[in-house]
Amino acid sequence: MLLQLVNGESAAAVASVMIGGRLILDGGRVLTVDEARVRGAAEKAIARLLEANAASLAFARSLENAVGDFSIARGREVHGLGACCRQRTASVPRGHAPVESP
């Protein structure tokens, strides 16, 4: 029965937790962690990582249109590679199958 109780409930069902006589969680709030300090450290880490990866992010964004034009989903759209290939079926070299229309 205890196993069913532990595994059958979510963390949202826990209101308070005591460990070794010390209140750790009360009313859904963790009492042993300075949440403002953790939040501040996380925000600083986000800013540091964004700055450290700014060049990589800019490069990736510069490739968005080119990569998108070669994706399978875009190739099936009328304005993607599929339309381009269907227009060129008349000039397909011998020995190669023409691209079928979807």
Image (tube, rainbow, N blue to C red):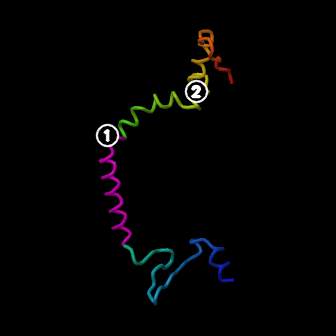
> Is 77 located above or below residue 20 in the figure?
above
Q: Secondary structure at mark 2?
A: helix
Q: Residues within 10 Å of mark 2 (few under 14, many from 20)?
A: some
> Is 77 located above or below residue 92 in the figure?
below
Give whichever of 49, 16 is nearer the camera: 49
> Is 8 located above or below residue 22 in the figure?
above
Q: Quadrant of the C terminus?
A: top right
The residue that disc 2 covers is 75
Magenta region includes residue 88 = no
Farthest residue, direction bottom: 21
The residue that disc 1 covers is 55
Q: Quadrant of the N terminus?
A: bottom right
Q: Secondary structure at mark 1?
A: helix
Farthest residue, direction front: 95
> Is 72 located above or below residue 53 in the figure?
above
Instruction: Kindly identify the residue that appears in the image at 33 percent across and 51 percent down.
Output: 49
Magenta region includes residue 52 = yes
Query: Which residues, given as a range, are shown in magenta?
Result: 34-56
Q: Quadrant of residue 90?
A: top right
Q: Quadrant of residue 72?
A: top right
Q: Amino acid at mark 1?
A: Ala
Which of marks 2 and 1 precedes in the sequence?
1
Q: Position of residue 13 (x, y in %)?
A: 59, 74
Specify whether 12 is left or right of 24. right
Instruction: Kindly identify the residue that appears in the image at 36 percent across and 72 percent down.
Output: 34
How far is mark 1 from mark 2, CA to CA? 29 Å
Specify whether 41 is left or right of 26. left
Instruction: Kindly identify the residue that appears in the image at 51 percent across and 82 percent down.
Output: 17
Q: Amino acid at mark 2?
A: Gly
Give whichever of 73, 51 is nearer the camera: 73
